[in-house]
Image (tube, coloured by chain):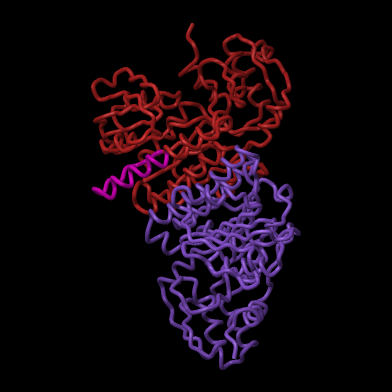
Chain colours: A red, B purple
């Protein structure tokens, strides 16, 4: 099993690489090669040995997609993207990286298919940002993808292309709309969604954290471990069972910020909760108001995708996998 | 009012040009120039006089979009497309014309906007092909766009781009998902949907016609006159009232083939109905089975779009506008 991870330097990409290297296998087949690609050469996971190759490359540069596909990986994970805020700030860069580079990859796969029948499993990380207000409280799988950001538009277009390239037989693609990942390890960041992790991660480490939205704010969360699990599960799925709509909303924990705080208290006591500073930020609240609150991910559940079901589990996973020791 | 029609050589484009030339105005402003563009130089409508300019150009050729936009038309109708069957047969041509050329037009508009604040009304013809099975009997405006053809994917991507380019302020775009146009004037064609017109048009002219599907088959129809009316209405709409989802499903006649035949009998008697040959074609039936049957076009209705409500009206419009005389 030859695996290519594009975007292997990101938080999820690095965890995915480590998991595959650790398993020594994917989708029931022994790992024979693990190509890790990102803008900067991504880390090679411990234990990967000579199977792993790390490479710095920009998928939006001419010829890069064709060169990556020339090695005919059996499974391609395409995780590389300009994030939401940057795609909004830099219109051209967002379209170049999130749309044109993705299409270049799909076109390279199509040309390889036309040359020799190559047809890889392609696993793509999409986003809840394909959904835009107005939204129902619980979003079904057949709700319109009507994004309110350029990032969401770029992801929605990639989803449409995956359906078409798969239907035409050029690839066997599966897209995953990941929940917001909580608890993200590391330091606070400037993302509008950063507080969903921060209000748990910082107090668990005895540090203060700022909550910019009301406790009634609801959202859809899963752990980094669950995200890696989705990707691994997608790599081994029977494509026929997926059907023609190839991107699936992943399961997650539907919860309010108040639910998160209650779980924090159960895990670390009232002194941890006291570290949260309530500082309403109307700008962030306005952004979050346009976000989806909960899903009925029936198609993904029927295909065996699973995630945590409580915030307590999200905290336990963080403590086991990522929390600083000592 | 300077108007540009891209795809002015098609059946709807030519009728639209004739209507605007005849009105001598659009959206309440006097016509000052009418640019008509298609792969072959489109006809100049009678009475347009010196205001109309006909030009042969391929929007997918380098520089064509920029040249068309350089004249800063106030309203751009983008009707040019490779049709469904051809986009399915020629994957590369479909993406080049329906996606890349459309994006080139939008990019030319964006660059003009960045240069001098240009922000035209862009009216785009989309398609019911953005919807794919499984579908509810009546499709609401917030149903997922999940096409089952490359053509549908290309149209759905254009819809997403219109939302984004409009939200960012580069254009003021509106897309229209046209019903199947019945009765199309002219001769029978090879389109899978051709019989919806043929079973009315041919018997009305005393000629035989073949029906390849059961009389229970349901579909969503509007006349060529209604389609032109949608385009004219879209040109003058208040963009703010449209909201963030800029492509609208147009109203139409929800009817069965049996309803069509009953209306034919009312219009032309049982001898006309006797000219229909029932010749079930499982291949065509399978295609039509994946098509939408009816819509609840609430957003378009609220914005004042109107169409016929009965097949009898579709026949009357055909007799008034297009049926051969004598």
Front-most of residues A110 and B171? B171
| Left or right of A302 in this view: B252 | right
Q: Hey, which residue is sitting farthest top in the picture?
A: A326
Give the quadrant of residue A90.
top right
| Left or right of A245 in this view: B72 | right
Residue at position x 65%, y 21% from top?
A261
Q: Does the stretch in magenta take in B70? A: no
Give the quadrant of residue A195.
top right
Up-down relation of residue B217 to residue A231 (above or below): below
Up-down relation of residue B199 to residue B9 (above or below): below
* Residue B100 showing in the rendered view: yes
User: The magenta stretch spans which residues?
Assistant: A102-123
Q: Report x, y in % for residue B164.
A: 59, 42
* Residue B259 showing in the rendered view: no
Up-down relation of residue A123 to residue B308 (above or below): above
Up-down relation of residue B68 to residue B269 (above or below): above
Q: Report x, y in % for residue A104.
A: 38, 40
Majority SS type along the magenta span: helix
Q: Report x, y in % for residue A95.
A: 50, 37
Give the quadrant of residue A131.
top right
């Amino acid at each position: 099993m030859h695996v290519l991870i594009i975007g292997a330097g990101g938080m999820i990409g690095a965890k995915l690489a480590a998991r595959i290297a650790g398993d020594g296998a994917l989708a029931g087949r022994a790992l024979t090669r693990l190509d890790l690609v990102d803008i900067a050469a991504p880390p090679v996971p411990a234990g990967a040995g000579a199977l792993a190759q790390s490479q710095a490359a920009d998928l939006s540069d001419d010829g890069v997609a064709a060169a990556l596909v020339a090695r005919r990986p059996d499974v391609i994970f395409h995780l590389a993207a300009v994030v939401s805020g940057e795609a909004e700030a830099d219109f051209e860069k967002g379209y170049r990286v999130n749309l044109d580079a993705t299409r270049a990859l799909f076109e390279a796969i199509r040309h390889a298919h036309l040359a020799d029948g190559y047809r890889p499993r392609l696993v793509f990380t999409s986003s809840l940002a394909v959904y835009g207000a107005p939204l129902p409280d619980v979003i079904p799988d057949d709700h319109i993808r009507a994004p309110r950001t350029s990032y969401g538009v770029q992801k929605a277009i990639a989803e449409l292309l995956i359906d078409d390239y798969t239907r035409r037989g050029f690839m066997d693609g599966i897209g995953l709309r990941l929940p917001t990942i909580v608890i993200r390890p590391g330091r606070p960041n400037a993302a509008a969604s950063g507080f969903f992790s921060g209000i748990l991660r910082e107090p668990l480490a005895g540090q203060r954290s700022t909550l910019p939205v009301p406790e009634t704010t609801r959202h859809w969360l899963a752990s980094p471990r669950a995200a890696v699990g989705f990707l691994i599960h997608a790599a081994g799925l029977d494509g026929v069972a997926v059907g023609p709509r190839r991107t699936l909303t992943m399961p997650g924990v539907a919860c309010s910020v108040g639910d998160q705080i209650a779980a924090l208290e159960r895990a670390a006591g009232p002194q941890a909760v006291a570290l949260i500073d309530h500082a309403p930020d109307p700008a962030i609240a306005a952004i979050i108001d346009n976000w989806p609150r909960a899903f009925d991910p029936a198609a993904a559940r029927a295909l065996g995708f699973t995630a945590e079901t409580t915030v307590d589990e999200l905290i336990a996973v963080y403590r086991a996998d990522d929390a600083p020791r000592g």
